[in-house]
Image: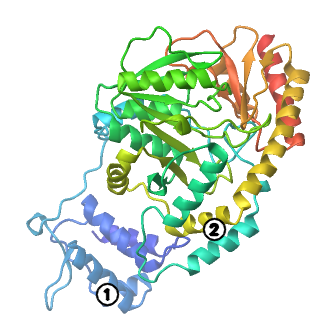
Amino acid sequence: MTEILSGLIDVALQPKPGETLTRQLCNALRQAILSGALAPGYRLPSSRSLATQLGLSRNTVSAVVDQLAMEGYLLLSRGRRPAVAGTKAGLMRARPASRGMAAQPRMSQWARRLSRADWPILDDGVPRPFQPGLADAREFPHDLWARYLRRAARGRPASGASEVNRPALQAALLRYLVEHRGVRADARQVMILPSAQAAIELVARVVLDAGDLAWLESPGYIGARVALEAAGARVCGVALDGSGLAIDGRNDQPRLIFVTPSHQYPTGRLMDVARRQQLLGFAAAAGALIIEDDYDSEFHFDGRPVAALQGLDAAGRIFYVGTFSKSTCPDIRLGYVVVPPGYVDLFGRAQRHAGQLGAAPLQDALAAFIEDGHFAAHIRKMSRLYRDRRDHFVRALERAAGERLRVVPPSGGMQLVAHLRRPTDDVAVVRQLRDAGVTARALSPLFVGRTSERGLFLGFAAWNEREIDAGVDMIGEVLRRIAR
């Protein structure tokens, strides 16, 4: 035992950055007891003697002994030196685990479904061209936004009590959606959540039971597929035609339909009015609900944005989902869902139970930012900028890789699809691009089931012309290397 304490002395006299000698001695003694190096019943030297050996004050050593006694590692008795607690005192020694003996995570059905989801994690903290869905934070008015945040923080009540969905943001956002997206709703129907993904996930949990059928556009948003499958739904991919979701000839009865009608993810196609009416009629006949994800349709380059599908819904079947992180900057982590009137109370309870809440100061700041016209002004500014970047990006792709990529410029949004002209493994291309410092998403995994289509899903919004040129040159080089 003397050797163990000698080792502790050596360790304790070598302080680690950010860790006091007191804490280090406490950790070392605790570990020696747990490992069995200091056996039950072993008596430590007196605090005076141990302090002398360690070169510490007696008060410091006494504090360590008292702490370990409080935690149950040591037994103190009047007139006797501290003793290591034994099994009778309830102390269980840690047994070193052999390699390969670590317990496997025990997962619920929900967690197993989630773990099977093929959702690529692209964000390693370093955004790179051409990460899809990323706004250019450099163009956001951060100083102006900071003033709104400070004002909102100063205005918070001392008690901290607040509504889950702040009425000021509900009202301001609804006025914007009514004017710019043709939404029809009452402010109580607007629910504020941490993200659009949180909204989709919560809608799926509220309306789906395990085994229910859900439709998803194919290709479509893989985050929606993850949420639907995690909720236990049987996800059926529905192909697209020139007008959007191809409904003709289908006789299955989905419980939930997920669509991106104003700017289809990822193709950028627009669902025309006739198809929208057909979809609403089909949903009514099937008793289905609809999630309409309006993820980046604020940015429309050719004429005015098309009104939301929700504005045509007279039966209360649509959950209309949106986000601020794409229309402002990625750090503003708030999304929203406009729920049908009959779901207001139910969804509010689900939102509280799931803890899907947006910070009240952030909601208040955003409400004032919208009300004062800055949000709409930012959208107008970025629409012009993103249109120019789209055009430059398309020209650069044609110049550097036109013989290998076919691009149909989207009428809006923040990203586009570049189809590979030759049979190529797009997943492998994405890996090679990542190694070269370029982020892309493969097109084929966005389909539900097998597909022969191959391509790259590329974001252009967050990158200036110089960055676009450099990234596109790298795409061209990688594709030429693969073709050799």
Q: Position of residue 337 (x, y in %)?
A: 49, 47
Mark 1 residue element: helix
Q: Position of residue 122 (x, y in %)?
A: 61, 38
Mark 2 residue element: helix
Query: Which residue is at a point 69% across and 12% down the rendered structure image?
Result: 424
Q: Earlier in the sequence, mark 2 or mark 1?
A: 1
Q: Residues within 10 Å of mark 2 (few under 14, many from 20)?
A: many
Foreground pick, 248 / 331: 248
Q: Decide: is 28 above or below 346.
A: below
Residue 368 is labelled as 2
Extreme residue toward the left, this view: 88
Q: CA distance from mark 2 to mark 1?
A: 56 Å
Query: Which residue is at a point 40% across and 34% down the rendered structure image?
Result: 114
Q: Is residue 100 visible?
A: no
Q: Which residue is mark 1?
A: 62
Q: Decide: is 137 above or below 362.
A: above
Residue 289 is labelled as none
Q: Position of residue 403 (x, y in %)?
A: 85, 13
Query: Which residue is at a point 37% across and 34% down the rendered structure image?
Result: 230
Foreground pick, 294 / 470: 294
Query: Which residue is at a point 48% across and 65% down the rendered structure image?
Result: 166
Q: Position of residue 89 (x, y in %)?
A: 11, 69
Q: Decide: is 402 above or below 59.
A: above
- The quarter of the rendered structure image containing the C terminus is top right
Position of 399 compared to 350: left or right? right
